[in-house]
Image: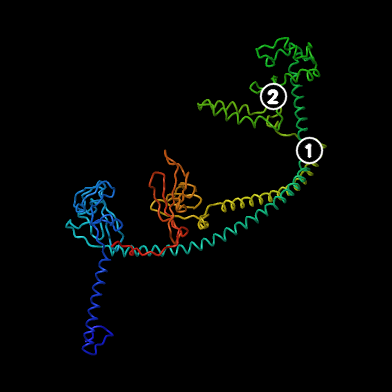
């Protein structure tokens, strides 16, 4: 009979030799099995981790880990707390501040409070914490380890795929940055040319506007001269009417006594016009004819003189020229009076009074007030001059308008160019990560719809919240800075100075970036009032995964 493959006994002596060899093989197998058993589990007190095993040497007394006391080793795990740091009872619940180490072979080891030892609840997946409670616990470590390994493998696959996408993003960002810098240089060069062109057009425009301005000034001068002449004629008519009204005896002279009949001319407003006061107005003469009245008297009394033929409620004539009638000023005064009045009836009275004041002063019995604002017809010679000026002005205006339009178009083009330059400079200046891997997020927005709100994240801009069924947006914060820890700065974004809460601070949002193959807003929350948190997945934060088998670090 052949006991081992490849060994064939041929003689009795050979058979003995074969049996001896079999015994050797059997002995080696047993020794190997024993050594493997030793490798599988290293003896140490219950509840002690492999890393702390060297503190628990059964061959000598045990010293508390804090060095406060040394006790015989047989008092370790004797269900009585001897050490202040609880290190003598790693496997019992005797010490209130003790920790029990779960080996959890096949899964991750862990520490649990020693108070949970033998409490009837299985905390360790290997059931080592319930060794004396009577509870039946299954060892689920292998199953948990398998599930965790699957999860880690899935995460590793996502990280690997995301990292590949990240490399593409970095390559695209590099090309994009180079393209933006090249475009910026072109725009800067184009801007210099546009500025030179604009200055040339400005010179042309100003040259075209000079004769236009001259023609308009001439036209305005004629208009002003005509208004002045019209006003002078009206003033003469008012003067003549006043002279006739004052000349009570119709002797062609106005005397001191006749002037005293108009008390509104009283210079000191004491209610009487004395003889010396009237004498002063007449230029110290006892009486004056119409010529002297016009030259000496009229200028000093015309502002206060009230015609006897005008209604008493009409105000004194105003010296304004027709282009600035009181009608344009009084509505503002009316508005001011209405603001100061608190009672409705008082407001109505003031408005009525103001409407009365709106009527321009009447200078004759036959002329209607409205006509004072209108310019009367010119005489033929004046009209002919105005027509020539208008014709020339129109021709010059067309030329100037064309120059202005060309200049304005060039100026707008330069402004647009400057805006493009500012936008590019701003984008280039942003911190898009060590390799600009986050640059693809610029000018993009991502939304997440929840049961009640629609959240919108625009990286490097702002975060908003809007009710799902309408309403205005609420600003949850504008871009602030990267806010991750020192060793992982680009894992957190901070958005600040959002819309203020009622009787609270301004809203702010913290955006936590996690690795993912897709770019999306995953979740939102409000952990504190007016402080929001957003979870955002992006390939830009994915790191190259490291090969690691979670089951290869079991403590035995």
Residue pushed farthest front?
13
Residue 41, percent from left and from top: 26, 64
Foreground of the two, 323 or 130: 130
Q: Give above or below for 426 relative to 361.
A: below
- Return the residue found at the far top: 275
> Tag 2: Cα neighbours inside 10 Å, few (<14), some, or many (≥20)?
some
Give the farthest residue toward the right.
Answer: 381
- Earlier sequence position, callout 2 versus callout 1: 1
Residue 245 location, x and y as percent? 73, 18
Residue 269 is labelled as none
The image shows residue 285, relative to residue 231, as above or below, that is: above
Residue ID at (23%, 84%): 17
Query: Which sits in the foreground, 236 or 468?
Result: 468
Q: Position of residue 222 (x, y in %)?
A: 78, 35
Picture coordinates of residue 359 (x, y %)?
A: 65, 28
Q: Left or right of 170: which side holds 328?
A: right
The one of 472 and 130 positioned closer to us in this rendering = 130
| Crowd tier of the residue under label 1, counting other residues whose Cα lies within 10 Å: few below 14, some 14–19, many 20 or above | some
Q: Which residue is mark 2?
A: 317
Image depth: mark 2 or mark 1 in front: 1
Q: Nearer the viewer, residue 132 or 60?
A: 60
Rendered-image quadrant of the C terminus: bottom left
- Please indicate whether residue 334 sits to the left or right of residue 384 in the image: left
Kindly identify which numbered label has been placed on residue 218. 1
For the residues bearing labels 2 and 1, Cβ distance under 8 angstroms? no
Q: Eyeballing the image, is 166 above or below 230?
A: below
In the image: residue 349, left or right of residue 77: right
How far apart are the alpha carbons under marks 2 and 1? 30 Å
Label 2: element kind: loop
């Amino acid at each position: 009979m052949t006991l081992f493959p490849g060994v064939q006994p041929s003689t009795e002596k050979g058979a003995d030799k074969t049996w001896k060899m079999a015994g050797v093989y059997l002995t080696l197998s047993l020794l190997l099995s024993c050594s493997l058993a030793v490798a599988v589990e290293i003896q140490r007190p219950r509840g002690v981790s492999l890393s702390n095993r060297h503190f628990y040497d059964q061959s000598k007394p045990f010293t508390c880990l804090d060095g406060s006391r040394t006790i015989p080793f047989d008092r370790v795990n004797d269900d009585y707390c001897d050490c202040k740091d609880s290190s003598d009872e790693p496997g019992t619940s005797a010490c209130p501040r003790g920790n029990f180490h779960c080996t959890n072979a096949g899964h991750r080891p862990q520490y649990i409070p020693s108070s949970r030892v033998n409490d009837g609840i299985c905390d360790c997946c290997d059931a080592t914490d319930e060794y004396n409670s009577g509870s039946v616990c299954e060892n689920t470590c292998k199953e948990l380890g398998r599930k965790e390994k699957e999860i880690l493998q899935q995460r590793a696959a996502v990280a690997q795929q995301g990292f590949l996408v990240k490399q593409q993003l970095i390559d695209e960002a590099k090309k994009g940055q180079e393209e933006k810098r090249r475009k910026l240089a072109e725009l800067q060069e184009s801007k210099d040319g546009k500025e030179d062109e604009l200055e040339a057009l400005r010179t042309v425009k100003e040259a075209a506007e000079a004769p236009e301005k001259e023609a308009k000034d001439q036209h305005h001068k004629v208009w002003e001269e005509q208004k002045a002449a019209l006003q002078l004629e009206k003033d003469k008519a008012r003067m003549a009417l006043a002279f006739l009204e004052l000349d009570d005896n119709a002797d062609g002279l106005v005397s001191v006594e006749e002037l005293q009949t108009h008390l509104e001319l009283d210079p000191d407003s004491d209610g009487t016009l004395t003889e010396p006061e009237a004498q002063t107005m007449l230029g110290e003469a006892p009486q004056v004819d119409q010529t002297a009245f016009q030259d000496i008297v009229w200028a000093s009394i015309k502002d206060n003189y009230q015609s006897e033929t005008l209604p008493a409620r009409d105000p004194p004539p105003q010296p304004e020229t027709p282009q600035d009638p009181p009608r344009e000023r009084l509505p503002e005064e009316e508005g001011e009076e209405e603001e100061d009045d608190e009672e409705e009836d008082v407001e109505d009275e003031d408005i009525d009074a103001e409407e009365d004041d709106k009527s321009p002063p009447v200078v004759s019995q036959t002329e209607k007030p409205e006509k004072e604002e209108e310019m009367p017809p010119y005489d033929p010679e004046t009209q002919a001059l105005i027509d020539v000026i208008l014709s020339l002005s129109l021709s010059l205006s067309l030329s100037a308008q064309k120059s202005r339009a060309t200049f304005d178009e060039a100026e707008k083009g330069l402004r647009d160019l400057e805006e493009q330059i500012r936008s590019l400079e701003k984008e280039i200046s942003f911190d898009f990560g060590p390799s600009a891997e986050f640059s693809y997020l610029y000018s993009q927005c991502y939304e997440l719809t929840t049961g009640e709100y629609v959240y919108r994240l625009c990286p490097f801009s702002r975060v908003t919240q809007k009710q799902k069924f309408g309403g205005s947006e609420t600003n949850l914060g504008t871009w602030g800075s990267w806010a991750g820890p020192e060793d992982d700065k680009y894992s957190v974004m901070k958005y600040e100075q959002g819309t203020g809460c009622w009787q609270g601070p301004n809203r702010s949002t913290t955006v936590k970036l996690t690795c993912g193959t897709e770019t999306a807003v995953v979740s939102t929350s409000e952990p504190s009032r007016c402080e929001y948190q957003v979870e955002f997945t992006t390939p830009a934060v994915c790191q190259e995964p490291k090969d690691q088998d979670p089951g290869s670090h079991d403590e035995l």
